Amino acid sequence: MTSKLGRRTFLAGAAATAVVRPAIAQAAPVRIGLMTVKTGSLAEGGFQMEQGILTFLKERDNTLAGRKIELISADTGGSPAGAKTKAQELIERDQVDVILGPLAAFELLAISDYVAEHKTPMMSLAAAEDMTQRKPNPYFVRASATSAQAMQPLADYAAKEMKLKTVVTLGEDFAFGYEQIGGFQRVFEDAGGRVLKKLWPPVGIADSTPYIAQIGDADAVVMVYAGSVPLRFMKQYADLGMKKPVIGGETAGDDALLKSFGEEAVGLITSCPYTMGTENESNKRFVADFYRDYANIPGFYAAGLYVNGMVVEAGLQKTGGDTSNKEAFIKALRSVSLNDTPRGPIAFDDHGNVIGNIYIRRLEKQNGKFVNRTVKTYEKVSQFWTYDEKWFLAQPVYSRDYPPLKS
């Protein structure tokens, strides 16, 4: 169902933050279409997405660059078919100026051509690599990360700081899993490590025990589950008496999951474009406002949509609040550079993908609460890591079998 979230939603219960904005004569609100997930296994992340953009708009009194904002929220159901339907409704019926979302790679890939045909600017958390690589969408901007963008620094850290020589990987059996593991494998092997085995459980798996039993002899396990699956995995891993270190990607130890982890998760090493402990003014404000409104700490999904809101605001400021020229608007969005966001400084490359910090965190218990403590920050990380861009783009996209295992 598509729902409109009006001005009162944003203003209820809190004072607005004063912001200086240009005075322009456009009376019509800017329409932002939010494609999120409120049903199914991805719903937890979907709700955080909506809460993240609501937090941002509430801080801005639902006004960006002098224009009121109308947010239209659409539940895709976490499926390609649902994403297609909602994209059509948002563009043709609601005539949105920009789309935020969807969440999953398979949703984004299902609507990319349609959105490009209608020249609608779109910003998504979905990490599908080729959207900003071999098959770029000129109306797409990604302020989060590609699937492999956080895994490449993690592989560097695993090899050089943790001194790991061998790993076994567990990734859910779809594009996000393939691309995360592929990015890790390439960098880890280039640093002298070896991936012994790649295991592919189904998406949203409830019981990882049969896969844990296949891990065998390795220095560590690389786990890139999403949603609530990491919670179950860490419990099952401990119940089987496993002691090998576990390292994981941006969704494996998300800050929003910290309240639900148990003692078995202590020591989990993860890599993410956002971490709640970032010490800057925008993140302090974001975390405080988010907790005030939702009695919860924000994770990667919420922070991602908050940052998307900041990029939209900066893009509107560049166009003087004008969204009528879609080519000019998408050009403005891609030219945004921000020094203070909840995830740190960001800019975009020529393909519309973010360049920003990646944080390596260790899950610890402090004062009775679980926290992700940053142990290393990789600054200005590109989607191409340290590789030559032309060489990188000439390689196949990461897949279930690429890169292949070394004999």
Image (spheres, grey):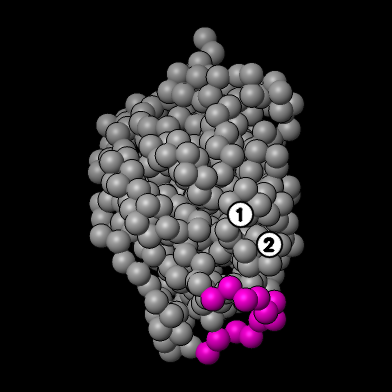
The magenta segment is 15-27
Instruction: Identify the residue at horizontal 52%, vertical 9% (top origin).
Output: 407
Instruction: Identify the residue at horizontal 55%, vertical 86% (top origin).
Output: 16
> What is the residue that sits farthest to the top in this orientation?
407
Q: Is residue 394 left or right of residue 337?
A: left
What kind of residue is marked 2?
Thr
Residue 131 badge: none
Q: Residues within 10 Å of mark 2 (few under 14, many from 20)?
A: some
Give the vertical position of 255 relative to 335 (above or below): below
- Mark 2 and mark 1: span between their CA atoms? 9 Å
Q: Is residue 102 left or right of residue 1?
A: right
Instruction: Identify the residue at horizontal 69%, vertical 77% (top origin).
Output: 22
Residue 382 locus on image (x, y percent): 69, 40
N-terminal of the two: label 2 or label 1? 2
Circles 2 and 1, Cβ within 8 Å, touching? The answer is yes
To which residue does mark 1 refer? 325
Look at discs 2 and 1 and give the one toward the viewer: 1
Residue 59 locus on image (x, y percent): 55, 79
* SS for dot 2: loop
To which residue does mark 2 refer? 319
Give the vertical position of 271 relative to 45 (above or below): above
Residue 283 locus on image (x, y percent): 62, 69
Residue 80 locus on image (x, y percent): 32, 40
Most common secondary structure along the magenta stretch: loop
What kind of residue is marked 1?
Asn
Q: Nearer the viewer, residue 393 or 403?
A: 393
Q: Nearer the viewer, residue 266 or 185?
A: 185
- The reply to whether the magenta stretch includes residue 238 is no
Instruction: Identify the residue at horizontal 46%, vertical 85% (top origin).
Output: 11
Q: Residues within 10 Å of mark 1 (few under 14, many from 20)?
A: few
Residue 230 in sight here: no
Residue 383 in sight here: yes
